[in-house]
Each structure stands twice: as C-alpha cells, then as structure tokens.
Amino acid sequence: MRDTDPHRLFFSIGCALGFSGVALGAFGAHALKARLAPEMLATFEVGVRYQLTHALALLAVAWACTRWPGWRAHASGWLFVVGTLLFSGSLYALSLTGVRGLGIVTPVGGVALLAGWLCLLSAPWRRATD
C-alpha cells in the first residue's frame, strides 16, 4: 500500500480536523468568550461543531474507501474537506472579523458538505463497473 491511499489520507485529515476543532473549541470557550459578542461567539461555535462533525465523517470516509473503493467514497472525502474549510472557515473569519461579506462563502461550503453526504450515501450502491 502506498502512503497516498485515499483511506490513509482522509483518516489523517479527519484526525487533523478533529484535533484543531477541539483546540478551536477551547480557544472559543476561554479566549474569545470575553472578547466576542454572544452572537459572534455562537457563530464561532457553529463552525467548531460542523468541523468536529465532519472530522468524524472523514474517518467514516476512510473506512468507506476500503470497503467500497471507487470515485463516490473518494469524492465524498474531498467534498467534506473543501466543505469544512469553506463552511467552518468562513464562520471563524466572520466571527473574528465581523466582516459580514465573508458569510457569502458559508452556503457554498454547506452545499459541498451536503454533496459529500450524498456521495457517501451512494458509495455502497455503486455498480461493479464504477
């Protein structure tokens, strides 16, 4: 097996997102609580929640890549990665800077996350030729 196998990659990215999600959650709870308005802190916490959820989803993708290899499981992993970066990243930036224009990126990330779930849902139902 190569180190670039999708299951290893998505497992590692999932672990990195999980680690950084816990760190960001602690940062929000301790360092930002006194510095951000309650609604901005809530926005930051939504970003953390989605990041942690999709960190776990990437662990499931790593498993799915070994169980049902093919483009669907692989695509779901990349959609989760991109979606998390766009969705959670835009919420972090919005809450820390207050620049409302950054919120335009959030739905794009959300659509990527939804597409990732649909790809993962379809992975076990692929045809043998896919």
Image (cartoon, grey):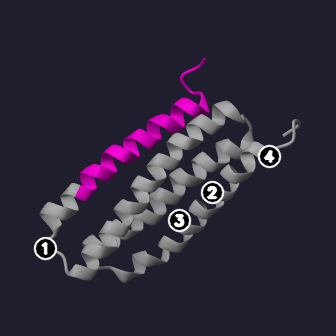
Q: Residue at x 53, y 73 (%)?
A: 107
The amino acid beneath tag 2 is: Trp
Q: Residue at x 49, y 36 (%)?
A: 11
Locate residue 82 relative to residue 36 in the image: left or right: right
Disc nearer the start of the sequence (4/3): 3
Name the spot of residue 21 as percent of width and height, x first.
Answer: 33, 52
Residue contact between numbered discs 4 and 1, judged by CB atoms under 8 Å: no
Observer-nearest residue: 122 or 24?
122
Q: Identify the residue under disc 1.
A: 35
Q: Which residue is mark 2?
A: 117
Kind of residue at disc 4: Trp
Which numbered disc, 2 or 1, marks the residue closer to the eye? 2
Tag 3: amino acid: Gly
Are the residues flagged by discs 2 and 1 in contact, CB closer than 8 Å? no
Q: Are marks 4 and 3 in contact (CB under 8 Å)?
A: no
Q: Which quadrant is the C terminus positioned in?
A: top right
Contact flag, marks 4 and 2 (Cβ < 8 Å): no
What is the span of residues highlighted in magenta in the rendered image?
Answer: 1-25
Residue bearing mark 3: 109
- Residue 12 rendering spot, x and y as whole percentages: 45, 35
Q: Earlier in the sequence, mark 2 or mark 3?
A: 3
In the figure, residue 62 lies in which quadrant? top right
Q: Quadrant of the N terminus?
A: top right
Question: For the stretch drawn in magenta, what is the main secondary structure?
Answer: helix
Asked if residue 17 lies in the magenta stretch, the reply is yes
Q: Can see residue 114?
A: yes
Of tags 4 and 1, which is closer to the observer?
Answer: 4
Disc on the earlier residue, 2 or 1? 1
* Residue 21 on the magenta span: yes
- Of the two numbered discs 4 and 1 on the same chain, state the one appearing first in sequence: 1
